[in-house]
Image (cartoon, rainbow, N blue to C red):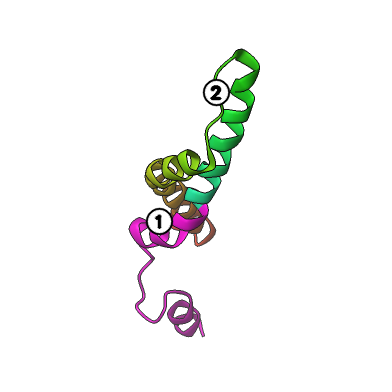
Amino acid sequence: MKRREEAVRDGGRGRPWPVWKLALLLYPFAAGAVAINLFLIGLMTQAIGLRALSPLESTIGGIVLGIPATWLAGRWVRGLIDEAEGRG
């Protein structure tokens, strides 16, 4: 029974997902979150006299800064999976 559960969990390959695969799946979510946060930070900076970021500038920043954010999120998720499966 345990082998079948492991095969289902790991897609039949018997090894955990690498961080880059997790990051690839998480990229759209992380890039979108970064873009929204950049836009909101741009709105808040108006209080100190700076201009707000446009939605296009925020989106471009989210695409670029989403890469390192996604890598960190992938490492975090991999650690959570390892902890839940008793590997780490």
Across and down, in percent, residue 74 comes to 43, 52
Measure how far apart labels 2 and 1 are at the Cα level.
32 Å
Q: Is residue 64 magenta?
A: no
Point 50% across, 62% down: residue: 85
Q: Residue at (52%, 55%) from the top-left corner? A: 29
- With respect to residue 53, does 60 lie above or below? below
For label 1, the SS is helix
Does residue 29 sit above or below 10 in this rendering? above
Q: Are marks 2 and 1 in contact (CB under 8 Å)?
A: no
Q: Position of residue 42 (x, y in %)?
A: 57, 29
Type of residue at label 1? Ala
Please identify, in this view, whether the residue under mark 2 or under mark 1 is nearer the observer: 2
Q: Amino acid at mark 2?
A: Arg
Total marks in image: 2
- The label number, if any, that marks residue 23 in the structure image: 1
Q: Is residue 51 above or below residue 80?
A: above
Q: Picture coordinates of residue 63 (x, y %)? A: 41, 47
Does label 2 or label 1 sit earlier along the sequence?
Answer: 1
Classify 10 Å Cα crowding around label 1: few (below 14), some (14-19), many (20 and above).
many
Q: Quadrant of residue 49?
A: top right
Q: Quadrant of residue 24?
A: bottom left
Q: Which mark, by number, is residue 8?
A: none
Q: Which mark is residue 51?
A: 2
| Crowd around label 2: few <14 · some 14–19 · many ≥20 (10 Å) | few
As rendered, which of 57 and 28 lies closer to the eye? 57
> Which stretch did the figure color magenta?
1-29
- The answer to if 12 sits in the magenta stretch is yes
* SS for dot 2: loop
